[in-house]
């Protein structure tokens, strides 16, 4: 078994602990990215081309293995996605100022494919674990939806639950070590699906019409809608516009829209519902009134002109491929910008140039990670130092306990394997 695959085998056991994925320290959370980047950069500088390719191939295989072992555990999936992005950015910046890429472009391209797969998996997990249950009648009981108040409250809660699932630490209002842009990217895709689902449900002929698609048209309970299905009036348009405003404000709070350089900064949440509300709020009653129409257009429009306009409209609809129910877009992935990544992992305040000059500050050793391996080379010295420090402080009762802990660390197979992996 290769060194890199052994690392993933041992680290996967360590990172199975759910508290690991909720580190508040970005440096500690991105330990896997830091270690793997050092190994890959070392391989590119000192090893043969064949060994470089082996390291790259085993790294990608190990990352896929680690991600698959997470199942549908969203915090752990997010943990690995954040590390893969950090790893790709680190290796990319490490070779920015060199004339030879040493195959790093192929390696980073492979990492980006893994990112896309992992990102899609997180989006699907959040959709089925959080958003879909909120659309079912069993979740909502006998609650009423007076002026859309229940719907507004229901989805505000769904947004907060989704954020807590993506980042438990951030959901509780604490700092989280993972890239903050990831939560926003996932939520953007899920909100787009909610937008399509509500749009299709509102345009049904009645609230009793059954849903037709598990993603594009999944809503069963009409109480989750801000307005009644089939109620296409001016008042409904105003009520819908109010609900959208409440949801957007909630999203702005939970996602912290101050994140640098959003993936789609100009994208508006609930674009379909916004357009529908604008259409409903048009003074169509006035336009339909015959006396008002004659005031602005006294001459009747020839029937041939109306038929031609109708035929042209049908032709454009066929060419555009628009159908009802409206289909949700497939999941797409745009990697986070270097600015967003440097903002967190490099701890340089978003200074990408500084990150490039230093290859990556993520490669620095952490005070609780790599030094553990160094201690294995001289365990007795480590024990003596701990005992001396304990005696000098007067805490003799803890010496035996620390000695036993050291013995457990030395005997731990995970650390032995890690030492073999990182010994060059």
Image (spheres, rainbow, N blue to C red):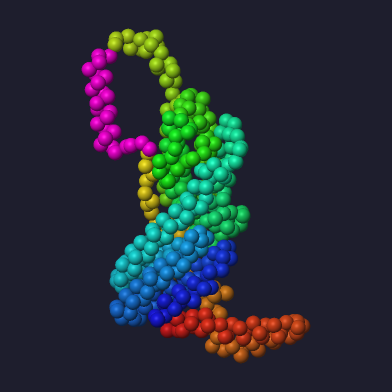
* Count of labels in the image: 0
The answer, for residue 60, to whether it is visible in the render is yes
Q: Quadrant of residue 211?
A: top left
Q: Quadrant of residue 334?
A: bottom left
Magenta stretch: dominant secondary structure: helix
Residue depicted at x 46% and y 81% = 422
Magenta segment includes 315 = yes
| Quadrant (top left/top right/bottom left/bottom right) for the N terminus | bottom left
User: Which residue is at the front of the view, 304 or 217?
Assistant: 217
Query: Picture coordinates of residue 341 (x, y %)?
Result: 46, 60
Query: Picture coordinates of residue 414 (x, y %)?
Result: 52, 80
The answer, for residue 26, to whether it is visible in the render is no
Q: Which region of the structure is painted magenta?
A: 301-325
**Is 275 rendered above or below residue 391?**
above
Residue depicted at x 29% and y 38% = 321
Extreme residue toward the bottom, this view: 380
Horizontal arrangement in the rendering, residue 310 relative to residue 32 (left or right): left
Query: Picture coordinates of residue 355 (x, y %)?
Result: 44, 65
Magenta segment includes 393 = no
Residue depicted at x 44% and y 48% = 189
Horizontal arrangement in the rendering, residue 407 relative to residue 101 (left or right): right
| Quadrant (top left/top right/bottom left/bottom right) for the C terminus | bottom left
Residue depicted at x 59% and y 58% = 169
Query: Picture coordinates of residue 59 (x, y %)?
Result: 39, 72
**Is 26 rendered above or below residue 120?**
below
């Amino acid at each position: 078994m290769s060194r890199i695959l052994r690392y993933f085998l041992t680290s996967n056991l360590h990172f199975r602990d759910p508290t690991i994925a909720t580190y508040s320290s970005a440096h500690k959370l991105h330990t896997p990215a830091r270690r793997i980047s050092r190994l890959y950069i070392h391989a590119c500088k000192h090893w043969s081309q064949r060994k470089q390719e082996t390291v790259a191939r085993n790294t990608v295989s190990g990352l896929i293995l680690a991600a698959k072992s997470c199942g549908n555990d969203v915090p752990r999936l997010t943990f690995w996605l954040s590390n893969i992005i950090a790893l790709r950015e680190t290796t990319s910046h490490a070779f920015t100022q060199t004339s030879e890429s040493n195959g790093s472009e192929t390696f980073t391209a492979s990492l980006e494919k893994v990112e896309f797969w992992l990102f899609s998996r997180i989006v699907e997990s959040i959709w089925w674990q959080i958003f879909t249950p909120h659309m079912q009648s069993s979740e909502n009981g006998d609650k009423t939806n007076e002026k859309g108040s229940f719907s507004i409250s229901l989805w505000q809660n769904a947004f907060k639950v989704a954020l807590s699932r993506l980042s438990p630490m951030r959901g509780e209002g604490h700092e989280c070590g993972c890239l903050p842009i990831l939560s926003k990217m996932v939520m953007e895709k899920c909100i787009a699906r909610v937008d399509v689902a509500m749009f299709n449900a509102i345009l049904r002929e009645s609230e009793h019409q059954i849903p037709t698609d598990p993603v594009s048209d999944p809503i069963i309970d009409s109480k989750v809608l801000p307005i009644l299905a089939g109620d296409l009036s001016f008042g409904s348009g105003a009520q819908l516009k109010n609900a959208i405003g409440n949801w957007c404000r909630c999203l702005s709070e939970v996602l912290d829209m101050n994140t640098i350089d959003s993936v789609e900064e100009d994208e508006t949440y609930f674009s379909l519902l916004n357009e529908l509300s604008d259409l409903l709020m048009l003074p169509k009653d006035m336009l339909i009134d015959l006396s008002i129409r004659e005031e602005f257009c006294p001459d009747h429009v020839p029937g041939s002109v109306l038929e031609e306009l109708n035929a042209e409209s049908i032709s454009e609809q066929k060419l555009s491929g628009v159908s009802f129910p409206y289909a949700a877009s497939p999941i797409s992935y745009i990697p986070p910008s270097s600015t967003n990544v440097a903002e967190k992992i490099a701890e340089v305040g978003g200074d990408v140039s500084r990150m490039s000059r230093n290859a990556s500050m993520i490669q620095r050793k952490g005070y609780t990670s790599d030094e553990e391996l160094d201690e294995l080379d001289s365990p007795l010295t480590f024990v003596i130092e701990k005992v001396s420090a304990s005696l000098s402080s007067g805490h003799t009762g803890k010496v035996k306990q620390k000695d036993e802990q050291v013995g457990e660390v030395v005997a731990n197979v995970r650390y032995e394997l890690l030492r073999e992996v990182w010994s060059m």
